[in-house]
Image (cartoon, helix red, strand yellow):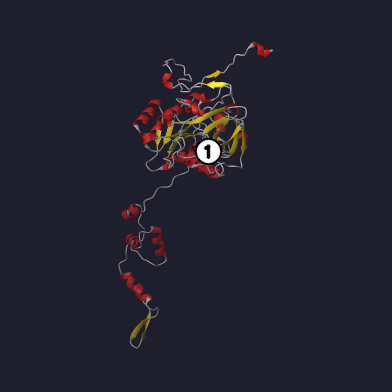
Amino acid sequence: MGVGRCENGLYVLDQHHHALVQLLSAHKPRASAQLWHARLGHPNYRIISSLSRLGSILYSNRSLPNNSNICVGCQLGKSHRLPFSLNDEHCCMPFDRLHCDLWGPSPVSSVTGYRYYAIFIYDCTRFSWMFPLKHKSDFFDTFVNLQHYIETQFSAKIKSFQCDGGTEFTNNKFRSHLHSCGIVLRLTCPYTPSQNGVAERKYRHVTETGLTLMFHAHVPVSLWVEAFSTAVFLINRLPSPSLDGKTPYEILFGKALDYSMLRTFGCLCFSYLKDYSPHKLSPKSASCVFLGYSTLHKGFRCPDRKTHRVYVSRHVQFYEHHFPYIDASFPTLQSNTDYTCFSDCADCVPSSSHDVSCDFLSSSSVLKSPCLPCSDVPNSLSSSSLQVSISAASLPATTPLDSRVLSPMPSPSSIPANHHHMITRGKAGIFKPRSHHDLTVLSSNQFF
């Protein structure tokens, strides 16, 4: 009840109009909490309860709605991903689980013609293998080769394979192969990359490290395969917090690492090339660029930017504070060149040298398997089914002497057909000019 007084025949409430409002509101029907929820723009019910305690709003039911009351508008407009719990699970047995993801397509094709790369992570040691791919369909052969490498080198079987739901992983050919080998396929839910977090974080680490190497040395973006392969090579040799400060390489191979052989990616270097000199007055070295480490040799990959030849040598002088791609005086490598692959081919190694080897930028038509500069790729994957054709123009030219008479070079059509299995210079299209000495007959009187 309100309290008031009588003034000139009119009753006036002492507390102004608040008492009357409270009196009238006590008999007015109150809105429900669900109605206030809709009026206020579908906020959380904790906000409605807070406004009720302040006396700003009043609702009829004393208790707020529970989870059994469904607001369709909130479900349709506020749906979001549920949080993930921290997972510290690690496999203890060798190759219990292998994580995988595929990156691409790259907006720029590499010099070798690749647009994708596949990353494989061994769960127990976090050791990674990277394989560049020209097409997604090349993934199956790459996985089979890696599987054979693991079974041969580590005497272990892959027990489970975790990946996302990409078509390269879910096609019938790949799933049938896993089923025949007894490998359990673990797929993530659609559009849920967080369930494949190990592979997602790894390829992010590889991509960021590779881009950093490229931007630091200002190398062309067409060399992203060399940069990313070098990044994997280095990441495998860096301590990891998830491994208690140990490196993946140390845990997998049980060997101590030697960091003294590491050099700055993209720096200027001079490789010892005396064995390739055409004559004794030629330079013994050439200006090259350091683009990673060879998996087939204990040496460095040093391409010559003028001839586009990649030399693999251990006799290299490095200038790690100079980067040829920054200096405008050095000729630049054209990204639209016809060369499509850096090939580590044993046939390119000169027979007279065991320390220096050379490979050429060969055409994709003769390359059947990916060949990586570095990234701890199994050697069998880099050299299998590899054929490199060396043209006569790529060989050092000889200097004819004045005392020689050179005969014209025979045409390939004049050579008789030879079906012997031995590969000769004639079959390879290499013809050396035949030289004849010009002899003069002198009389015996000239000697006395």
Q: Nearer the viewer, residue 341 or 352?
A: 352
Q: Is residue 367 left or right of residue 125?
A: left
Residue 150 visible in the shown view: no
Three-letter code, disc 1? Ala
Please name the residue that numbered disc 1 is placed on: 231
Q: Residue 394 location in percent, x, y?
A: 51, 29
When asked about the image quadrant of residue 369, the answer is top left
Q: Farthest residue in the right direction?
A: 448
- Between residues 432 and 179, which one lies in front from this camera angle? 432
Query: Where the C terminus falls, by quadrant?
Result: top right
Residue visible at 42% across and 36% down in the picture = 163
Direction top: furthest residue: 444
Residue located at (31% from left, 54% from top): 72
**Which sits in the foreground, 211 or 172?**
211
**Residue 148 coordinates in the image, percent (x, y):** 46, 25
- Quadrant for residue 133, please give it: top left
Is disc 1 surrounded by few (<14), some (14 to 19) or many (20+) residues within 10 Å?
A: many
Q: Tell whether 300 sits left or right of 363.
A: right
Q: Position of residue 407 (x, y in %)?
A: 50, 21
Q: Where, quadrant-wise, is the N terminus in this rendering?
A: bottom left
- Name the element at disc 1: helix
Residue 6 at least partly seen:
yes
Compared with residue 341, is residue 411 higher up or lower down, i.e. above or below? above
Depicted 20 relative to depicted 179: above or below: below
| Residue nearer the viewer, 38 or 212 | 212
